[in-house]
Every structure is written in C-alpha cells, then in structure tokens.
C-alpha cells in the first residue's frame, strides 16, 4: 500500500527520523475515527513549548494540529494529554476561546506508547513566536488584544466545571494548602536526575514561608488552566482578541485566581526581562499589570484582594516547573541551551515574586 502522507522527495525530517510521529499510522487511525480518506500534506513542526511535539498539517482540505507527548516522555505525559482531550471536549459550547477538538487517540499502541489528539488549526498569532496584523501596525490593537488575555481568563474562571462534566477532574478541597509543599517536593525530585547538582534557585525557602503564613481562605473552585501566559494564547487576525487558549496539559480544578497570578508574574512590564511574549513585548504599548487586574475584575465576581499572594505562588510554581527542563537537560534528556535559558528565567521569576511580596 502506498503512503497517504506527502513528504518532500529525498527528505526525512528530524522529528520523523526520531520516530516521534508515525504519520501513516495517524492516517489509518484518523480514517477509522471518521476523518476523510484524504492525504496528509504540508506537515511541519510548530511551537508547543518544551514539553510536547506539535505538528501542523493539512488533511485533505482541512488544516489540523496534532499534539503528542515529547520524545522523552515523563511518567505522567500520557495522562496529561488525556486530560487535555477531556478539557477541550468539555469547553465546546462555552464562550472560552479554545481549539476545537477533532479526535483523540487514547490507544497508546498507535504511536508506540504515546497518546495524541487532533484539533482544528486556529488562525492567530502567538505573541511568543511571531506577530501578524493587526498587531504589528497598531498600538491600539496590541493593547486591546493583550488586555483580552485577562478577559478570556475571566471567562474561563466563570465556567461551571460541574455543568460541563469536569466535576472529577481535580481535588479542589485544600487546593491552596497543597501548593507549596507539592512544588517544594517536585523541586527536590529533580535531584534524582543524573548530572543535576541540585537547585541553585534564590528565595525558595523565604517564599515558601511567606506563602504559608499569608495563605488566603479557599474560594469557589473552577477550571484552572495551570500555565496561563502570553505564549499560551493565540491572538486573532480579524480583530484584537484572544482567538484561542492553548496548551492545557496542566489544567485542573482549583482556585482560578492562580491563573491570573500566572499571567501577572510573567507579564512583560516594569522593566522586567520578558519571560513570555517576546515579539509582542518588544513592540510595547501593552497594558500594565494593574490594568489587567482591573479588566479581569470588570468581568468577574471574584475577590482580588489577595492577588499578590497568587502572583507570588505562580512565580514559585512556574520557576519549579521550568527548572525541570534544566534538570533534564543536564541529564541529557532535553536541549542544554533551552535548559540554561529556562534556568535563567526561573531565577527571574523568583526574584520578581520576592519583590512583589516585599522579601
């Protein structure tokens, strides 16, 4: 049988040579799942963070995106992708901007141990990659589109997670209390990786103590994206707004204000080296963090009195998460340059969290 996957003659892309994605198997599975018996063409790898493999492709006359775990998957990688599939399916019909789930493959045998899913490609610009119009030529568009990152987040926080079938996705009881010890344990776990000398991150113990002493009371639970920042949104081309929130692998049910804190601690303003949204940050004319909080408040009934606490927690948590790439890089399981870049970013996040808390 001839392949239904179109490849440049004489070319064997790096991701294909590494057996990251068997496109012929994807094609056979897709037809069985109800996709048309049409060729897969124009396949290319696109950005998707450091954690997953993301491919853009045309399937007949339809543009799709495939997402699967990384080349060196962690024990929870397949579970994270299954969670993404479930969340994207649940968000259908809500006003939360997200890619439409086309089909998900829960059978690990199709891709040699990895689950994956297909979603509709979204027309939009990633602020952390490359911007198109109207943002390149309009300061107003940049400001309005960036402001909608807070508005889209408020819409997500307003979704009734039980009503959309996500009542058992996480454990909202005690969500805030678990955060600091969980992420300290996660940081300590990196020491088991060969070649990693242990964390050399500033302010960790001081932040942990401050967060524990100032923890706010539990509030109404909701959907938490878990990694919400400029690099994980697509800005629409037709009008300044968020076209889609992407990368849902850390999604859970808990306190949605942690997402707002995540956006704030990564926000490129006040002279901070941008952790996310490089091209957009370089152009400027963005709302400041106070404007983001005000905009969120105008679209939400949640109490934002303790938003600095959530911002500091987000800084600690994200620093621990991205330090993991540095640890895996030293163990030969991730790119060393990327690991060093993220280690530097983790230090910056912790410095920012310490300044917010007055440490």
Image (cartoon, helix red, strand yellow):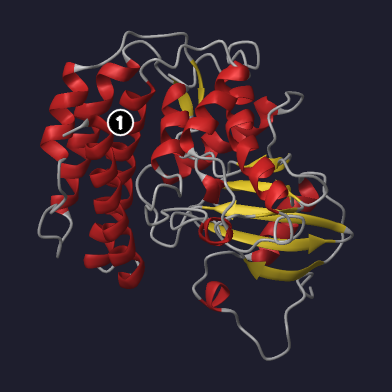
Residue 162 in sight: yes
Q: Position of residue 25 (x, y in %)?
A: 67, 61
Q: Position of residue 281 (x, y in %)?
A: 53, 56
In the displayed structure image, the side of residue 69 where residue 181 appears, left or right: left
Q: Quadrant of residue 317?
A: top left
Label tally? 1
Q: In this orientation, which residue lies closer to the viewer: 225 or 27? A: 225
Q: In this orientation, which residue lies closer to the viewer: 71 or 123? A: 123
Above/below status of 196 relative to 318: below
Residue pointed to by mark 1: 313
Q: Which residue is drawn at 59% across and 11% down?
A: 162
Q: In which quarter of the image is residue 153?
A: top right
Q: Residue at x 64, y 44 (%)?
A: 143
Residue 108 in sight: no
Above/below status of 265 relative to 211: below
Above/below status of 359 relative to 53: above
Q: Position of residue 242 (x, y in %)?
A: 68, 41
In the rendered image, the quadrant that contains the C terminus is: top left
Q: Position of residue 328 (x, y in %)?
A: 27, 60
Q: Is mark 1 on a helix, strand or loop?
A: helix
């Amino acid at each position: 049988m001839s392949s239904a996957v179109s490849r440049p003659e004489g070319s064997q892309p790096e991701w294909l040579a590494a057996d990251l994605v068997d496109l012929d198997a994807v094609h056979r599975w897709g037809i069985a799942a109800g996709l048309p018996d049409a060729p897969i063409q124009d396949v290319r790898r696109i950005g998707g963070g450091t954690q997953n493999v993301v491919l853009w492709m045309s399937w007949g006359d339809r543009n799709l995106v495939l997402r699967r775990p990384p080349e060196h998957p962690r024990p929870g990688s397949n579970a994270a992708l299954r969670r993404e599939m479930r969340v994207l399916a649940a968000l259908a019909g809500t006003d939360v901007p997200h890619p439409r789930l086309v089909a998900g493959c829960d059978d690990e045998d199709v891709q040699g141990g990895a689950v994956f899913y297909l979603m509709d490609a979204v027309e939009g610009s990633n602020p952390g990659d490359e911007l198109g119009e109207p943002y390149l030529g309009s300061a107003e568009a940049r400001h309005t589109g960036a402001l909608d990152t807070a508005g889209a987040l408020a819409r997500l926080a307003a979704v009734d997670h039980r009503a959309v079938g996500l009542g058992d996705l996480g454990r909202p009881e005690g969500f805030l209390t678990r955060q600091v010890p969980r992420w300290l344990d996660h940081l300590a776990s990196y020491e088991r990786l060969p070649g990693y000398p242990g964390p050399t991150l500033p302010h960790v113990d001081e932040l942990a103590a401050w967060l524990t002493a100032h923890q706010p009371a539990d509030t109404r639970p909701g959907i938490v994206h878990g990694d919400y920042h400029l690099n994980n949104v697509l800005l629409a081309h037709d009008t300044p707004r968020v076209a889609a929130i992407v990368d849902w692998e850390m999604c859970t049910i808990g306190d949605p204000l942690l997402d707002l804190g995540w956006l704030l601690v990564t926000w490129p303003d006040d002279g901070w080296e941008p952790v996310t949204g490089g091209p957009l940050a370089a152009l400027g004319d963005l709302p400041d963090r106070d404007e983001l909080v005000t905009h969120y408040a105008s679209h939400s009934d949640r109490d934002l009195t303790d938003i600095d606490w959530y911002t500091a927690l987000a800084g600690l948590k994200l620093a621990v998460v991205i330090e993991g790439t540095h640890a895996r890089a030293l163990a030969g399981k991730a790119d060393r340059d990327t690991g060093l870049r993220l280690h530097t970013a983790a230090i910056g996040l912790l410095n920012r969290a310490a300044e917010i808390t007055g440490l």
